[in-house]
Amino acid sequence: QSIGCDDYLGSDKVIDKCGICGGDNTACKVVSGVFKHTLTNLGYHKIVEIPEGATKINITEMSKSNNYLALRSRSGRSIINGNWAIDRPGRYEGGGTMFTYKRPNEISSTAGESFLADGPTNEVLDVYMIHQQPNPGIHYEYIIPGDNVISPQLLAHRRPGEPLNGQLEMPESTDHDDEDSHRETDTLTGQSPGTFPVIQPGRFPSHQPENQVPAVQPPRQNREHNWKQIGKTECTTTCGKGSQYPVFHCVNRITHEEVPESYCDSSTKPIPEEEACNIFPCPAFWDIGEWSECSKTCGLGMQHRQILCRQIYANRTLTVQQYRCHHLEKPETTSTCQLKICSEWQIRTEWTSCSVPCGVGQRTRDVKCVSNLGDIVDDEECNMKLRPNDIENCDMGPCAKSWFLTEWSDRCSAECGDGVRTRSVVCMTNHVSSLPLEGCGNNRPSETTPCNNGPCAGKVEWFAGSWTQCSIECGSGTQQREVICVRKTEGNFDVLNPYECSFLERPPSQQSCYLKPCGSKWFHTEWSTCSKSCEGGFRVREVRCLSDDMTTSTQCDPQLKPEEKEPCNTQDCIPEIDENCKDKYYNCNVVVQARLCVYTYYKTACCASCTRVANRQSGFLGRR
């Protein structure tokens, strides 16, 4: 079984955030806020006051800065970062509790400084900021007891009859024996003289309060044994003011020989009081901080550490002026560092072809980060700012679209009767032709054409003939078969109209087929318009080798490649003869020489002459 906070076995009581065993977090209140004031003067600026009895103290800089947090008591005693001396991160005692001072790594972290303490505090503490640059904001938070809650700390240190939170404690009984027992209580230890106090180092005050009445000593009895101081405990430190206590043993009053303590009256044993010892200061020393992270992950960098001159006195380590450490050689505060030799970028391949045959696409190349040993490592090992591009855009020119077709299949889908021959049709981008081609549009070329291999003989009832060969030798095609309605007679079959068999399920007459992958085949567009109407022009089409998935391939047979250009309209240009076109005057050659044929009157009056000149000029321009 577990032990609760009330020290009872099997108890499930726990301490709540208010520090109360078995509490429900309602006996205290959380004080929090953010100090965001804009400061102008350099130096110490008060941020917040931490009251007496505060617990769960958290003072945190909201982001990293060149400012420092500082802490001191209301009496003016510096606890952390006082007197313009910056302490190392660590644990510092003050205000009756232990503060943890954190300063994250100056290079790798963006977090600010912080003070953390569990409390409770036994005095008022002031938090300061050493202002050197704009304030990033200081978040503070602590817990204090509620208005009607008795602080455990006040309960432990109050005097009998003192008010608790402004209210006097009412005694439960007025018995005079109780009053006497109060008076007999030792004013120094708070324990009855009849019990032996538990002595713990560090729990005794260094001096009695001036207004404290000495404890009443019982009358000395004439006994054979009494208490005698035989020495002192070892000093807690060798320098810098330590503490020690007298040691009392029970001895024979006459022979002064030590005897068991039970021989003496424990109520008369003197209470050891703390005594100072070795009060001379300890020699100053260099307090060496940890090295910071290297400023660079590879190559030559720098690292820093903090060096402070410190001296120990009264169990506290104080930062002192550096001249006190002049008898010692000061360690270096900076040092060069190199974690490893930097890796570098290497371009391993040339640029690939553009990802598209026309338009804007992309091309890539292989870029790797290579160590000084030649091994490929993660990209983070190299300087990302110097990384060569491994991908870029490429412009292959504007795209046009055309219908690409294969040749008609050699086989008819039906061995007899009506069938079809097929071809593949696909709309693809045109990027080779020098002639302007229109887009694919809605005039898709037909993929089938009818064919007939002669009449078929009839069979029985719904008669389904054998499937024809696949309409194409490779890829997806179709198969046909004849399905007719017949009637069986003696020795032969009569073909009937299909409606005679309508009560029966008609077998399918067509199905898809796939013999094998086609591999790569030549596709081509339709011929373009002839470049001239007579005297020899040319027309072009685009030819591509495409694989089964209609992507560009290089596996087609070059000898079977269709022509991409052919002559057209090779006939001579013959002008049209108009019988009504005649010269009305004998001197029309003068009209031609004077270039008057551009006028309607002369063009009509000298029609034949003007027409001959126009035909000669158009023929000359065509040959050019």
Image (cartoon, rainbow, N blue to C red):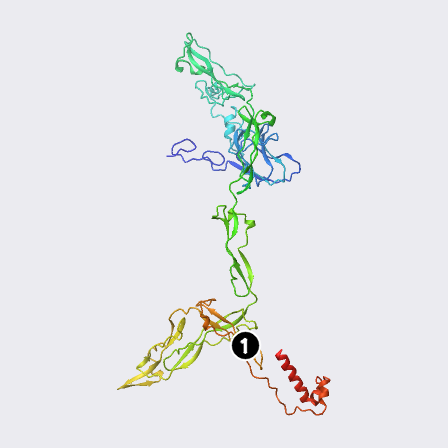
Q: Secondary structure at mark 1?
A: strand
Tell me: residue 235, above or below residue 24: above
580 and 151: which one is in front? 580
Is any atom of residue 245 visible in this view? yes
- Please identify the quadrant where the N terminus is shown: top left
> At which x and y percent is residue 407?
45, 75
For label 1, the residue is 539
Report the residue that reaches farthest toward the left. 490
Disc 1 marks a residue whose amino acid type is Arg
> At which x and y percent is residue 594?
73, 84
> At which x and y percent is residue 566?
52, 77
Tell me: residue 90, above or below residue 258: below
- Residue 398, by quadrant, is bottom right
> At which x and y percent is residue 545?
47, 69
Question: Is 503 left or right of 399, judged from the image as shown?
Answer: left
Report the residue that reaches farthest toward the top. 254
340 and 25: which one is in front? 340
**Are there few (<14), some (14-19), or many (20+) residues within 10 Å of tag 1?**
some
Counting labels gives 1
- Residue 333, by quadrant, is top right
Question: Is 39 left or right of 388, judged from the image as shown?
Answer: right
- Please identify the quadrant where the C terminus is shown: bottom right
Is any atom of residue 321 visible in this view? no
